[in-house]
Amino acid sequence: MNNIRLLIEYDGTNYHGWQRQASPHGEEGDAHQTIQGTIEDVLTGIIKQPAKVVAAGRTDAGVHAMGQVVHFKTTLQINESSWVKAINSLLPADIVVKKAEYVPEEFHARFDAKSKVYRYVIINSGCPSPFLRNYVWHMKRPLDIALMREGSQYLIGHHDFSSFRASDCSAKSPVRTLDRLEIEEVSGEGIFLFTFEARSFLQHMVRNIVGTLVEVGRGKIAPSDIGNILEKRDRRSAGPIAPPQGLYLSEVMY
């Protein structure tokens, strides 16, 4: 059995997230259009048997990816460049396979990942661009990057992130290690780039952190209060969730 790893980019605007959703009455197929369902349907047509794709990270509706990694297994053997051409010829324009490679049969896209990098983009401007509305969070009120950076330091390291996970998060433990959280202003034009790196994240963790740090940047929450929010372990103590369109799964390291 061949195990094939794909590097994928996608625009998540028109999809109900990564994960295929079961039809309400149990029929086969995708209840809503998803990235996984779209890719699996294309692969099933190529390999002539049901395809099962496993991803490094399961992105939410409206979230994008520049470096998603998946694997699938098949008995079909063609060269790696032919996999890329065959799959891309059938995928819609908002999903693209950048690379395909044969990997050991035991390779697992999710469990073998050493770390994942997510990036979130905010444009801090009084006049939002209609062309970027699906790819950034437009924030009209001024943000203080120094305050946001100060607040972010309380989040780096090994913590219980209960205050920053979704209420219906199914993870067994809320404890995670956030290895990197950087905030930079790109080109001095009010474009803020948040970079997060960890081995794994809780559901909505990145977006909840961004939403809370924005409240810090607006002066609504003191930077030192971030530590108190962590200690409370209560989602209601943190800020609102940031919208999905500014979030990108940027890279997965193995």
Image: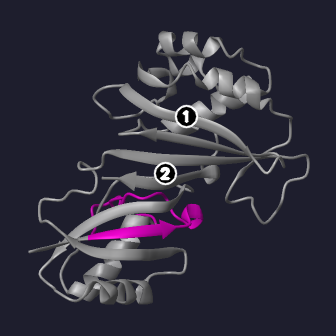
Q: Which residue is mark 1?
A: 181
- In the rendered image, the residue lying farthest to the right is 126
Marks 2 and 1, how far apart in space?
Answer: 20 Å
Magenta highlight range? 5-32
Contact, mark 2 vs mark 1 (Cβ under 8 Å)? no
Which residue shows up at 80% across the image and 29% down it?
144
* Amino acid residing under circle 2: Asp
Q: Residue at x 40, y 73 (%)?
A: 38
In x, y percent, where is residue 244?
A: 60, 49
Residue 77, horizontal then vertical, whole percent: 16, 86
Q: Residues within 10 Å of mark 1 (few under 14, many from 20)?
A: many
Q: Quadrant of residue 239?
A: top right
What residue type is disc 1 on? Leu
Q: Residues within 10 Å of mark 2 (few under 14, many from 20)?
A: some
> Closest to the observer: 24 or 4?
4
Camera-nearest label, 2 or 1: 1
Q: Secondary structure at mark 2?
A: loop
Per the image, label 1 sits on a secondary structure element best described as strand
Task: Give above or below for 119 relative to 161.
Answer: below
Q: Residue at x 49, y 25 (%)?
A: 156
Q: Is residue 63 magenta?
A: no
Name the residue located 28 percent from the left edge and 86 percent from the top edge: 45
- Relative to 197, say whether 33 is above or below: below
Residue 105 is left or right of residue 54, and the answer is left
Q: How is the image coloured?
A: one colour
Residue picked out by circle 2: 60
Count of residue discs? 2
